[in-house]
Each structure stands twice: as C-alpha cells, then as structure tokens.
C-alpha cells in the first residue's frame, strides 16, 4: 500500500505477475496489467499520470460514481410523496450523483490478509440532495486467473435511491494505444433503451435486431457507428443502456465480451445488475494527460458500466433503485481477462 497525501493506492499482484492498482479516489480502478497472447504485459485501463487528476475529471475514469450512477431527469425524483431536488450537472439532468458525487470523494480503505480491498464511503443525509445517511462499500478481489471482482454494497437509515457501478474504460491493446473502434464487442442484450436528446430513456424498450445497436453477434465497436441513426447522433456514438437478457435479481450473467484482434486479449464482463451502459468514450478529448503522457482522444476506450438504467427513480417500469432502511443494496461485477 502506498499513501500519496490523502490518496491511498493499493496494488494487488497475482501468481502470474498480472497486477491491479486501486485508488481511494472514488474507489477507482487505475491500473490493470495483463498479458497479451504472446505473454507481453500492458496496462489496459484508461487513466491519468497524476493520481490527483482523477478528481473532477469529466470521464469519471475507473471510478465508482454515486449516489446514483448515470442520469436522473431534470434532477428530480420523489419517494413516498416527498420530492427531492438534485444538482443539475449534465445539460438539464443530474449525472453520477452530482458535481460532488462519490467519484470525487476519498473513500476509507482497508486491506485484509487475503488481499481483499474494501473501500467505504459514508454519505450524509442531504448530500447532493439525496435523503438518508448512506454507507457504501466497494469490495475488490483479484484472483490468480485474472478475475477482478467488485462487490458493491449500500445501507441507509432513510428511504433513498441508489445506483452503483464502476466506470472503467478498457482498451485491450493498452491504455495509450489509441482507438478501440476496431475491437470486437459481444453483448448478451437483445434490447436497449432509446433516449431523448439529453440521453434520458423515453420509456421504450427497443429490440436491437436490424439496428446498429445489435451486438448479439460479435462485431467491431465502430461498425455502423457512422450510420444515419438517431440514437447514435444523440451520443456521438454509443452511450446507451442495454438490458440484460433473462435477468434475475442476484444471479450472475455474462453480459459482455470484448476482444482485441491485435493483442489477443479478451475481457468478459459478468454481473448481477439488470443493465449495462455501453459508452464508447465519445467525449474523451480534453481529459487530463493519460498514463502514457499523451492527451486522450475520443474513442480511446470503452466503458461497460453494469448498473440499473438511467432515470429509474422516475420510471416505475424499470427495476427499482429504491433502498429502504431494512434493505441492503448488493450487486456484483466481474471482469475476467484471458487471451485468445
């Protein structure tokens, strides 16, 4: 464990020499070093050269946003007839818990003898407009077969809304290698949520068949992204919520597989969450200098954010994000690295 002022960095190394570095800034994933098909190691998660650049970065790189990841329309929701108002920080909407969301907080860090890393953040009642004193935990483990598991928990003393995820951007050719648009993506999702121009779901659940949103057969991320298709125009590419096929609460499902034809690296993502927001890094330009010492460009990485859908507190048909004092938020995301 290495302390950098108020920031704590923890590096976990498995039996093969592959490494993961985690940060107390937003309970973040800041480094994942895994082999390619020739055994050459590279860091495959986007991030910054200076650990302090992770504060208030636009891309939310590698971190766990909250109290509500993704967007809430117009920064309003109600619980039991009580209306709550949030900071609006993404056009007309609230995004990732607001400007002082969990991603911009220092989390407490504990590492046990088995290498399990637990980050804890205590969010006060009324913080960023959300009700209830909430305790959130992000618990990481790193296995010898290159499986990074993140278990997310939360408890509250007052009814509130919670949506936790991790916002890592992946590039299986290496974090400074350039565009991911040629990397191959498969999704176990036959439906997605169309949005309005502010990226709030309209309420429609649309089949991906016959559209550029269809990743049920593996294809390059960039294939079809330049087509005249309204959902792609709104996000300048992919920034959409895909619904997990045959989702059941608490059951792990493999929802995504990302593969690099150049390096042979493969990333499989499994989760208990009902949806995955696929964001192709469409607005990465202008971010802080990356770990390779170069400016980031749009499409340098892809985020596979396992979560509940945007605006669920205002759309009753979606899986609920309501958390009451007698309940516990408990979801798992697993990133499994291998080679082809």
Image (tube, grey):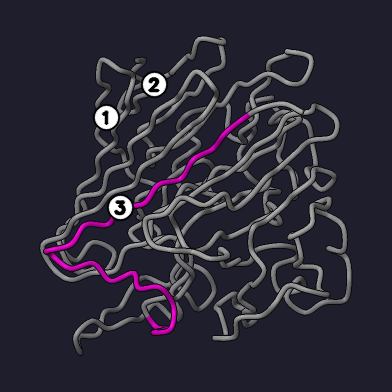
Residue that appears at 67% across and 49% down: 284
- State the CA–CA distance, disc 1 to disc 2: 9 Å
Region in magenta: 314-337
Residue 103 on image: x %, y %: 40, 48
Tell whether label 3 touches label 2 (CB within 8 Å): no
Tell whether label 2 touches label 1 (CB within 8 Å): yes
Label number found at residue 320: none
Residue 221 included in the magenta stretch of the image? no
How crowded pointer 2 is (Cα within 10 Å; few <14, some 14-19, many 20+) is rated as some
Kindly state the secondary structure of the residue where label 3 is placed. strand
Placement of 217 over or under 300, stated as above or below: below
Q: Quadrant of residue 183?
A: top right
Placement of 312 over or under 272, stated as above or below: below
Residue that mark 3 sits on: 330
Quadrant including the N terminus? top left
- State the CA–CA distance, disc 2 to disc 3: 23 Å
């Amino acid at each position: 464990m290495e302390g950098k002022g108020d920031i704590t960095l923890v590096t976990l190394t498995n039996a093969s020499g592959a490494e993961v570095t985690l940060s107390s800034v937003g309970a973040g994933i800041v480094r994942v070093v895994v082999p390619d098909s020739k055994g050459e190691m590279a860091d495959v998660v986007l991030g910054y050269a200076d650990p302090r650049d992770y504060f208030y970065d636009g891309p939310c790189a590698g971190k766990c946003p909250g109290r509500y990841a993704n967007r809430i329309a117009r920064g309003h929701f109600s619980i039991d007839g009580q209306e709550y108002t949030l900071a609006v920080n993404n056009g007309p909407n609230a995004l990732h818990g607001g400007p002082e969301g969990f991603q911009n907080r220092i989390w407490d860090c504990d590492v046990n003898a088995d290498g399990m890393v637990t980050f804890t953040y205590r969010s006060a009642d009324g913080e960023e407009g959300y009700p209830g004193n909430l305790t959130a935990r992000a618990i990481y483990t790193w296995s010898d077969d290159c499986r990074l598991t993140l278990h997310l928990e939360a408890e509250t003393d007052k009814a509130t809304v919670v949506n936790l995820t991790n916002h890592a951007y992946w590039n299986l050719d290496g974090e400074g290698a350039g565009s991911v648009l040629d990397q191959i993506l498969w999704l176990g999702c036959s439906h997605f949520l169309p949005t309005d121009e502010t990226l709030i779901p309209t309420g429609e659940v649309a089949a991906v068949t016959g559209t550029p949103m269809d990743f049920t057969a593996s294809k390059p991320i960039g294939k079809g992204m330049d087509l005249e298709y309204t959902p792609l125009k709104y996000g300048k590419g992919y920034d959409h919520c895909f619904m997990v096929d045959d989702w059941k609460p608490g059951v792990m499902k493999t929802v995504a597989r990302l593969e690099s034809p150049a390096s042979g690296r493969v990333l499989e993502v499994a989760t208990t969450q009902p949806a995955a927001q696929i964001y192709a890094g469409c607005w990465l330009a202008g971010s802080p200098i990356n770990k390779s010492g170069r400016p980031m460009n749009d499409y340098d990485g892809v985020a596979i954010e396992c979560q509940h859908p945007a605006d669920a507190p205002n759309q009753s048909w979606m899986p609920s994000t309501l958390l009451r004092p007698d309940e516990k938020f408990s979801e798992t995301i697993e990133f499994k690295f291998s080679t082809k």
